[in-house]
Image: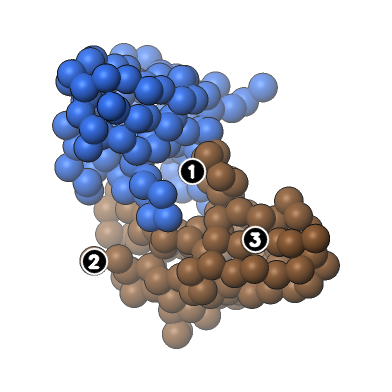
Amino acid sequence: KNQVEQSPQSLIILEGKNCTLQCNYTVSPFSNLRWYKQDTGRGPVSLTIMTFSENTKSNGRYTATLDADTKQSSLHITASQLSDSASYICVVSDRGSTLGRLYFGRGTQLTVWP
Amino acid sequence: EADIYQTPRYLVIGTGKKITLECSQTMGHDKMYWYQQDPGMELHLIHYSYGVNSTEKGDLSSESTVSRIRTEHFPLTLESARPSHTSQYLCASSESADSGVGQFFGPGTRLTVL
């Protein structure tokens, strides 16, 4: 059962516009939540990582928020660029094992049009 | 330069062939992982390793095998490839302790079995 749900599944925006991607999770016990950017045919690249005590973290034009109470996270992209076109994956880690198991969302496919 | 490499990037092969997907990292990470990802779907963990001579199966059952003879090297082998093995295979590595940096992913190998 997929414990990380992302929405929307796909999104098309015009260059220069802002957008927000959503992630809801049911993973427990929670360790941290990560947002990755995956270009087509490439491996995922980490954008942000947030622990339980953090509710916002920025990386350039990317700002992630976390509400651990409602188990929701969002990734806000400001002033989008054509190079932002990619799949954005929400990943939640639990504390239930030494491995720190990762639960992956299916990603939001973002397309930025000129 | 610290990085994680995968070869080949693309592989098209006939049914029944034996294949080995290579993964190497130069970051000195103890933990390494193999994921399988179909288009538009989430990553599924198929193998992981805590260190040299340590290998474990992941969440998704796979007919592939792995070995960890050297810290930096984590190859994946399919003894007899089948069309059902067609997928993208992603290798990742991380530090022993969860420093909050997360996993570093390689560029992936796109495997097509005819």
Residue type at mark 1: give it: Gln
From the image, state whether disc 1 or disc 2 is nearer to you.
Answer: 2
Q: Secondary structure at mark 2?
A: loop
Tell me the crowding category of disc 2: few under 14, some 14 to 19, or many 20 or more residues within 10 angstroms, Cα based: few
Chain given the colour blue = B
Q: Are marks 1 and 3 on the same chain?
A: no
Callout 1–callout 2 Cβ contact below 8 Å: no
Callout 1–callout 3 Cβ contact below 8 Å: no
* First in residue order: circle 3 vs circle 2: 2
CA gap, disc 3 and disc 2: 28 Å
Q: Secondary structure at mark 3?
A: strand
Disc number at residue B63? Answer: none
Q: Which residue is mark 2?
A: A1
CA gap, disc 1 and disc 3: 25 Å
Q: Is residue A82 left or right of residue A88?
A: right
**Image point (44%, 43%), residue name:** B97
Q: Is residue A78 visible?
A: no
Q: Is residue A14 visible?
A: yes
Of B104 and B19, which appears nearest the observer?
B19
Q: Secondary structure at mark 1?
A: loop
Percent across and percent down for residue B21 are: 36, 21
> Residue B114's quadrant in the figure?
top left
Q: Which residue is mark 3?
A: A111
Q: Which residue is mark 1?
A: B103
From the image, state whether disc 1 or disc 3 is nearer to you.
Answer: 3
Chain given the colour brown = A
Q: Is residue B91 above or below residue A58?
A: above
